[in-house]
Image (cartoon, grey):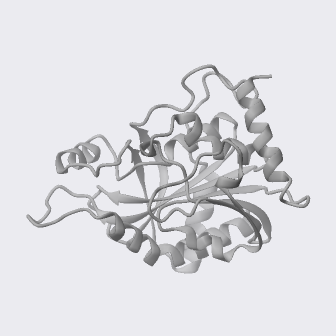
């Protein structure tokens, strides 16, 4: 067996050993300021990343660094309350390690969320944007020897975000009175925020929102044939026509994400009920 897979399996065993036989079927990644969804998980088992041997710790603002396993929408879920970012100095294998652990623990679908800047002029502060596709400017997490136990050398990415889950979200959003936008997410390395010229470039090449995460997780999930639903909370309007005194501030991003977290939580909970 691939020694990397052996390491993942040891972590999977550590996680399963804390769950008293419960088997999560849906994985959730909670982005910057979006950890509030974890508070809706019932009968929770909290597993701090620091208690898992060899597991990376999350250092980003608004990321607590826990797995939370429990009941949401009538199903057993495992949520990442804080993700691992490439800009924190971890290599890509570490960035996507939590996803591989969740896959090993048995998830059959993955929901990813993030806080993002809206480069599309149609997006406004507080909007929820369903990710329909992405543009990857981060290192691909599948570079190197293939994880044959998980998927093929050259996985298809024609539909990285599951069309049936997008359709479900749009239907539920309409029923619940939650306006949902759709767009293309651009993922960059960070940690510096982008320049106005870069925002214009992202918009020119077809991007609607930009962030520093998510895409490596999606690639690894799709490599293992796990369907993915992605959603961004627009926490700032990332245009190229700023006032002279404007600055991007990380605390403001978290505050804006928190303000939108309530409607995102309601939507995701209903989606899980219907999955």
213 or 159, nearer to the observer: 213
Measuring 61% from the left and 28% from the top, which residue is drawn there? Answer: 155
Q: Is residue 72 above or below residue 109?
A: below
- Regarding residue 159, the answer to whether it shows in the image is no
51 or 226, nearer to the observer: 51
**Residue 224 percent coordinates (x, y):** 69, 36
Q: Is residue 185 above or below residue 216?
A: below
Q: Is residue 200 left or right of residue 214?
A: left
Q: Is residue 7 left or right of residue 239?
A: right
89 or 26, nearer to the observer: 89
Using the rendered view, name the quadrant where residue 182 is placed: bottom left
**Residue 130 percent coordinates (x, y):** 49, 59
**Residue 79 percent coordinates (x, y):** 67, 60
Measuring 76% from the left and 28% from the top, which residue is drawn there? Answer: 149
| Residue lying farthest to the right in this orientation | 21
Q: Quadrant of the N terminus?
A: top right
Measuring 57% from the left and 51% from the top, which residue is drawn there? Answer: 57
- Regarding residue 84, the answer to whether it shows in the image is yes
**Residue 114 percent coordinates (x, y):** 48, 58
Q: Is residue 108 left or right of residue 219?
A: right
Q: Quadrant of the C terminus?
A: bottom right
């Amino acid at each position: 067996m691939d020694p990397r897979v052996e390491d993942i399996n040891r972590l999977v065993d550590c996680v399963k050993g804390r769950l008293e036989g419960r088997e999560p079927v849906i994985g959730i990644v909670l982005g910057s300021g979006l950890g509030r969804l974890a508070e809706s998980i019932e009968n929770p088992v909290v597993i701090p990343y620091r208690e898992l041997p060899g597991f990376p710790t999350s250092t980003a603002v608004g990321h607590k660094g826990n797995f939370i396993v429990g009941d949401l929408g009538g199903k057993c879920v495992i949520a990442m309350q804080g993700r691992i970012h490439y800009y924190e100095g971890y290599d890509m294998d570490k960035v996507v390690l939590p996803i591989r652990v969740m896959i090993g623990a048995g998830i059959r679908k993955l929901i990813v969320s993030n806080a993002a800047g809206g480069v599309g002029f149609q997006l406004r502060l507080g909007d929820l944007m369903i990710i329909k596709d992405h543009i990857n400017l981060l290192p691909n997490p599948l570079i190197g020897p293939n994880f044959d136990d998980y998927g093929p050398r050259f996985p298809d990415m024609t539909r990285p975000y599951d069309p049936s889950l997008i359709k479900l979200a749009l239907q539920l959003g309409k029923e619940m009175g939650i306006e949902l936008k759709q767009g293309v997410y651009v993922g960059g390395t960070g940690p510096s925020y982008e320049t106005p010229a870069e925002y214009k470039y992202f918009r020119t090449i077809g991007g609607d929102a930009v962030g520093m995460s998510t895409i490596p997780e999606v690639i690894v999930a799709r490599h293992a044939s796990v369907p993915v639903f992605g959603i961004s909370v627009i926490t700032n309007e990332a245009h190229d026509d700023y006032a002279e005194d404007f600055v991007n501030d990380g605390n403001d991003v978290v505050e804006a994400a928190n303000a939108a977290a309530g409607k995102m939580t309601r939507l995701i909970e209903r989606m899980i009920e219907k999955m």
